[in-house]
Image (spheres, helix red, strand yellow):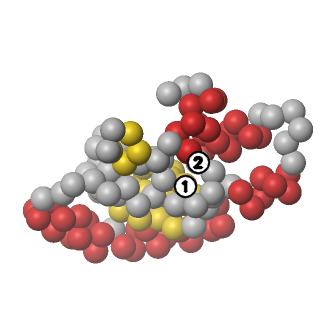
Amino acid sequence: MTDPIDEFCVQQLRDFDDKKLVCVTKEGLDLPESEEEKRKLEEAKAKYEKLCKVMKDVLGDKVQKVSVSHRLVSTPCCIVTGDYGWTANMERIMTAQALSNSSTMGYMSAKKSLEINPDNAIIQ
């Protein structure tokens, strides 16, 4: 799904063939986890709590929060958008419009969150 029309269509299409469609670029992605994975994530959150706080202080208003991710496998971190507002791809499409309005862009752009991967060597 790389065409601009895909972004508009998927926002309106909530489910397909009794399967709920979920945007993976937004925070709150709910992946199935075993009890061991949940325990490991809780330990990682406790271990990297101070790092998350320092990163948030350094980044300031550029991100809403910094948290430990359960979705990342190989990359050290990723930026995700909030549950409400435009996705990053939709923001890119709207800013590329010829008559884009900066006042509209301000309140429709979603708050960004940084998710770090506790298993990545850079973060460790």
The percent position of residue 71, horizontal first and vertical second, equals 32, 50
Picture residue at 70% right of the left edge, 36% below the top: 93
Picture residue at 85% right of the left edge, 42% below the top: 100
Helix, strand or loop for disc 1: strand
Apparent side of residue 99 relative to residue 117 in the rendered image (left or right): right
- Residue 10: tell me if it is visible: yes
Which disc, if any, is residue 81?
1
- Residue 24: tell me if it is visible: no
Picture residue at 63% right of the left edge, 29% below the top: 4
Q: Amino acid at mark 2?
A: Thr
The answer to whether the residue labelled 1 contacts the one labelled 2, judged by CB atoms less than 8 Å apart, is: yes
Apparent side of residue 44 relative to residue 89 in the rendered image (left or right): left
Picture residue at 12% right of the left edge, 59% below the top: 34
The percent position of residue 98, horizontal first and vertical second, equals 87, 33
Mark 1 to mark 2 CA distance (whole Å): 6 Å
Quarter of the C terminus within the rendering: bottom left
Earlier-in-chain disc, 1 versus 2:
1
Residue underneath mark 2: 87
The percent position of residue 102, horizontal first and vertical second, equals 85, 51
Badge 2 density bin: few <14, some 14–19, many ≥20, Cα 10 Å: many
Q: Amino acid at mark 1?
A: Thr
Query: Vertically, is 46 above or below 68?
Result: below
Badge 1 density bin: few <14, some 14–19, many ≥20, Cα 10 Å: many
Helix, strand or loop for disc 2: loop
Report the front residue among 11 and 73: 11
Residue closest to the far front: 17
